[in-house]
């Protein structure tokens, strides 16, 4: 991701974050570039890893995933192997939407979705608590969503 961004690149990013389905012709018009130049810049940012992908924002309640839990996890050991084992296991779980490695009291924070508390309990008992090296888990259930943005202020 060594590509330096100019004002045209930043404008393309702002527009695509707002509407990733925008046709290249429309994008070019909004940015003030030719369609070919706009497409080249977009492709260069994709290849550089600046644009990681495109997707739809889905309402969790509409797909029966209204329970959101922030899960703080501590590991017993901090060896490279133990940490990588935890990371590899987490990456394979679809209910884990995000995972951050942390400094401070906990080693990781996960954002987990589930249909209900029973399903979350099952996730804890049958997955998290069975992972080698997990020493402490603290769950915080989200009562309501206040803000959930995916648009970066570029």
Image (spheres, helix red, strand yellow):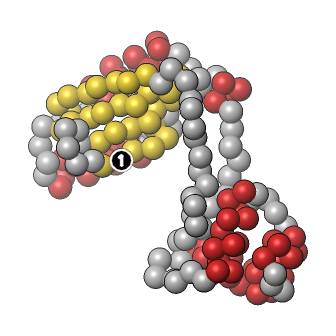
Residue for point 57% across, 61% down? 153
Q: Is residue 56 above or below residue 51?
A: above
Percent position (x, y) of residue 84? 26, 52
Quarter containing the C terminus: bottom right
Q: Report crowding for label 1: few under 14, some 14 to 19, many 20 or more residues within 10 A (C-alpha).
A: few
Who is closer to the viewer here, 120 or 68? 68
Q: Is residue 3 above or below residue 131?
A: below
Q: Is residue 71 above or below residue 102?
A: above
Q: Is residue 43 visible?
A: no
Residue for point 55% across, 71% down? 50
- Looking at the rendered structure, the number of numbered marks drawn on it comes to 1
Identify the image quadrant of residue 89.
top left
Q: Is residue 123 above or below residue 43?
A: above
Residue for point 33% across, 19% down? 125
Check disc 1 and report the residue beneath it: 100
Who is closer to the viewer here, 15 or 116? 15
SS assignment at label 1: strand
Identify the image quadrant of residue 59.
top right
Q: Is residue 141 left or right of residue 3?
A: left
Q: Is residue 60 left or right of residue 33?
A: left
Residue for point 56% across, 29% down? 145
Percent position (x, y) of residue 6? 60, 83
Q: Is residue 154 visible?
A: yes
Percent position (x, y) of residue 99? 39, 44
Percent position (x, y) of residue 109? 34, 39
Who is closer to the viewer here, 147 or 139? 147
């Amino acid at each position: 991701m060594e590509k330096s961004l100019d004002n045209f690149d930043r404008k393309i990013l702002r527009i695509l974050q707002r509407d990733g389905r925008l046709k290249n012709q429309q994008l070019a018009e909004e940015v003030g570039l030719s369609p070919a130049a706009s497409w080249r810049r977009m492709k260069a940012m994709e290849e550089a890893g600046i644009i990681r992908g495109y997707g739809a924002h889905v309402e969790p309640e509409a797909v029966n995933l209204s329970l959101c839990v922030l899960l703080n996890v501590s590991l017993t050991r901090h060896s490279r192997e133990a940490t990588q084992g935890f990371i590899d296991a987490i990456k394979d779980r679809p209910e884990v939407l995000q995972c951050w490695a942390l400094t401070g009291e906990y080693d990781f924070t996960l954002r987990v979705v589930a249909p209900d508390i029973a399903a979350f309990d099952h996730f804890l008992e049958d997955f998290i608590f069975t992972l080698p090296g997990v020493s402490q888990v603290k769950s915080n259930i989200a009562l309501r969503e206040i803000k959930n943005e995916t648009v970066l202020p570029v």
